[in-house]
Image (tube, rainbow, N blue to C red):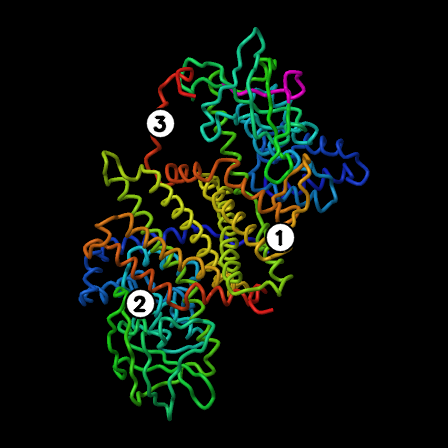
Amino acid sequence: MTLEDLRQRVEEFLATHDPATTERLEFLRARYDAGLAWVHFPEGHGGLGLPQAWQPEADGLFAAAGAPDNNPNSNVIGLGMAAPTILAFGTEEQKRRFLRPLWTGEEIWCQLFSEPGAGSDLAALGTRAERDGDEWVVNGQKVWTSSAHLARFAILVARTDPDVPKHRGMTYFLCDMTDPGVDVRPLRQITGEAEFNEVFLSDVRIPDTQRLGEVGQGWAVATATLNTERVAIGGRATPREGGMIGLVAQAWRDHPERRTPELHDRLLRLWVEAEVARLTGTRLRQKLAQGRPGPEGAAMKLTFARLNQQLSGLELELLGEEALRYSDWTMVRPERVDFTSRDAGYRYLRAKGNSIEGGTSEILRNIVAERVLGLPPEPRVDKDVPWKDQEK
Amino acid sequence: MSELNLLYTDVEDDLRSSVRDLLTDRCDPQAVIALCDGDRSMVAPLWKALATELGLAGLLVPEDRGGAGASAREAAVVLEELGRAMAPVPFLTSAVMATTALAATEGDLIAGLAAGERTAALAVPLSTTPYGAIPAVPATDGRLTGTVTSVAGALEADVLLVPAVTGDGLALHAVAATDAVRVPVVSLDMTRQLADVTLDGAAATLVVADAEPALRRALGVGAALLASEQLGVARWCLDETVGYLKQRRQFGRVVGGFQALKHRLADLSTGVDSANAAARHAAAVLAADDPDVELATAVAQAYCSDLAVTAAEEAVQLHGGIGMTWEHPAHLYLKRAKADQIAFGTAGAHRARLAGLVDLPVAP
């Protein structure tokens, strides 16, 4: 199938499903069934087995026709992480059950990976899943879970064998968040709001049919999930002065009375860096479109985190007295997260998370050093020690 | 508008291989170090091989005037390789800048440059920016008198392209190198040795009248493509340092396994990849004759010139004592990177230009 054929398919679909008169959910489900949801997915699962780079073409035609979208920002974990992992490791039955309502946004997903005692060292996690007939019984605590209070399902990694070294004793599950043993509590952060949650799991029962991959294969499955996350971060196309730099540049233009040579110098240095980061992202995307994915997404995220932090800090200095006021410390639970939303004070505080979430900048530097440059790995003293015998 | 390709095409990859193979054979690092002691015997044969065997002298000259008709994208790939090997040849000064200044001309000079039979240099200080005043000497009755300092490529050239002030404004004149006094300068970067050029009533031929646009264009293209040379310099520094730290052992371990060093190299690698995007973008914009060219040039220079210096400084530091020696080539890259940072304007000069281009003025 050529790109032209794809365009024709979309046009034909739009001709039989008028976006103006078709009910939203009906439209989205039909779009999925026509293979026009994520065109790189296989036929029968919302796609046509086409190159991922062709997706923007389909999205553009739907948007131009005024078609409803699946509100992708409200299901970031589902679309960016759960779906590719289910596609790669799921059974046919799992793909049929979960992928369509995930794509349409009928079912929101969250991620139950990190724990209080397992952050950067995710493989140290201690949430236990024990087999009970055709079910697994899960007990433990997860943390930093965005959207847990909105999610219908979660991707979950739990320890199924404590007697082997940590990387070998984990299994990956699809967990129903409506199970009575799931307790979601908001976790308030430095911005005042609670974007994420703590999730307590007490005798949560998961049918074995919702195990993803083999028992003990959880680390390989989780690694696949985390890799798709970093590709997603590097994969966005942005216009010049998009994101944080646009806000800071606008603050400069709006406040001639605040201009000093020192602020000007810092602004221009960061403007150059933001523009180069944008071009680096474009280049990375072009590489990925040629099917040459690598660990470079880690480098992109390092730059993104540093620039967001420096820019949001500069913005406060540019605003002067105005920056001494904060919009609102009231505890709220936002439905979606936008780093550039709200006021400059929020942006400054929220950006501090950019170098922690999705892999700390320190861990990402290790990844670049080891997987891009081939330098020796960090010493792993606990590599061959059974999980139950490790110091916790 | 379709997105510019920031990767390398197969043709560009092939060109890179040809240049790299030739440099591996004929650009011996020890001979390059000997340049610093005044032995320039390697320069002429190396340039002849690149200029004529690979046809690089006429790479950018249109086919109807005897060149290869290639674009800035290909010239950028060549400069990456020349920077990587620290090749002391006048590709940037003659094949890029002189041919760009003469782009609108026809005749023996451009044909001679395209064929690699002649080599030219723009007689301006290497530090001249594309944005400021262009230094020029006075012209009287077709004869030029005056001194131009710190000219790159003059020692390798047989013809000098001299900006001169005439009754009708700025004009570009050709002067035979033998009619000028060229005093070699003890240069910070001896792999691109400068010369002070003195003209004493030298006979000159007018080649471009009303030459300011052509001169700014030549300086701008030089600056835009210098970013690719800086990328080549930085990439060598990174690769060489990573290679060394995988071998070097202290405290019973390969030192490249220490996290303090791994993190520095990870940051450098991230920077070099960013420089790659910036330099590639500037070349692609030039090749596409995109209106963004001034902005892309200023961004590429503002980023790549500092990054190359950082890479070279990290290379010296992370090599430890060996990085301070005359014997190890790291110092060549440090000196080139620092000189390149000043060539065609510092990063600060390019940022100042950018401020005007993107509406971020310093004054209210």
Residue B18 location, x and y as percent?
32, 54
**Observer-nearest residue: B127 or B115?**
B127
Q: Mark 1 or 3 closer to N-term?
A: 1
Q: Residue at label 2?
A: B90
Q: Is residue B235 above or below residue A357?
A: below
Q: Quadrant of residue B62?
A: bottom left
From this view, report whether residue B255 is shown above or below residue B3. above
Magenta residues (range): A171-183
Q: Residue furthest right?
A: A21
Quadrant location, the C terminus of chain B: bottom right
CB atoms at circles 1 and 3 under 8 Å apart?
no
Between the residue at mark 2 and the residue at mark 1, the CA separation in whole angstroms equals: 53 Å
- Image x and y of residue A204, in percent: 61, 15
Residue under the point 52% across and 53% down: A274
Q: Are marks 1 and 3 on the same chain?
A: yes
Which residue type does callout 2 highlight? Answer: Pro
Q: CA distance from mark 3 to mark 2?
A: 51 Å
